[in-house]
Image (spheres, helix red, strand yellow):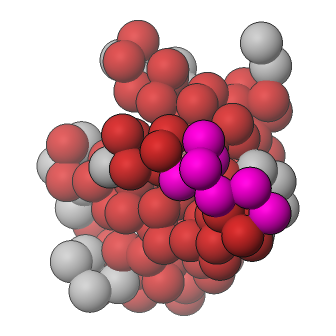
Amino acid sequence: MPDFIDKLKQYGGLLGKGLMLEMAPGIAGGIINELFHQWHVDVAKITQDVQSDRSLWDGMKPEQRNQLKSLPRRVGNLDFITPAFIINSVKKDFPSVASLLLNWPEANEWLVRQIEELKKQASEV
């Protein structure tokens, strides 16, 4: 996928930029879903993470951090990444986790903090 995005940027000009903005949520949603799979996320894990206020950034491997840091260059502004976006991105593969994040206020607050931290880390060079 990165090769496709690089070629699109190279040859697309304004059309490519517009297309990238349209594709950004799908790309980011796929990355988020893949990270949930890599981390073997389940209800017990999220419950523990919320109760211990675990930082997702601190738990990321260097290659995952690099992937996250490349997101702004690849998709532009990350403002579209919200708790609702995360939940929607994982609800098909992780319905119980999505329900927990949506319906447990502490989990939703934890998710908001994690998103803010990850966006901040992604934007730092």
Residue 66: x and y in percent read 49, 20
Residue 82: x and y in percent read 71, 69
Q: Pick the quarter of the image with the C terminus.
A: top right
Residue 2: x and y in percent read 39, 41
Residue 123, can we see it?
Answer: yes
Image-quadrant location for residue 98 = bottom left
Q: Is residue 59 left or right of residue 71?
A: left
Residue 45, can we see it?
Answer: no
Instruction: Give the overall secondary structure of the magenta segment.
Output: helix
Query: In percent of the image, x 38 and y 50: which residue is there?
Result: 4
Q: Is residue 9 magenta?
A: yes
84 to 2, vertically: above or below: below
Residue 54: x and y in percent read 52, 34
Q: Is residue 102 left or right of residue 119?
A: left
**Residues in magenta, as a range:** 8-14
Query: In percent of the image, x 41 and y 86: which residue is there?
Result: 99
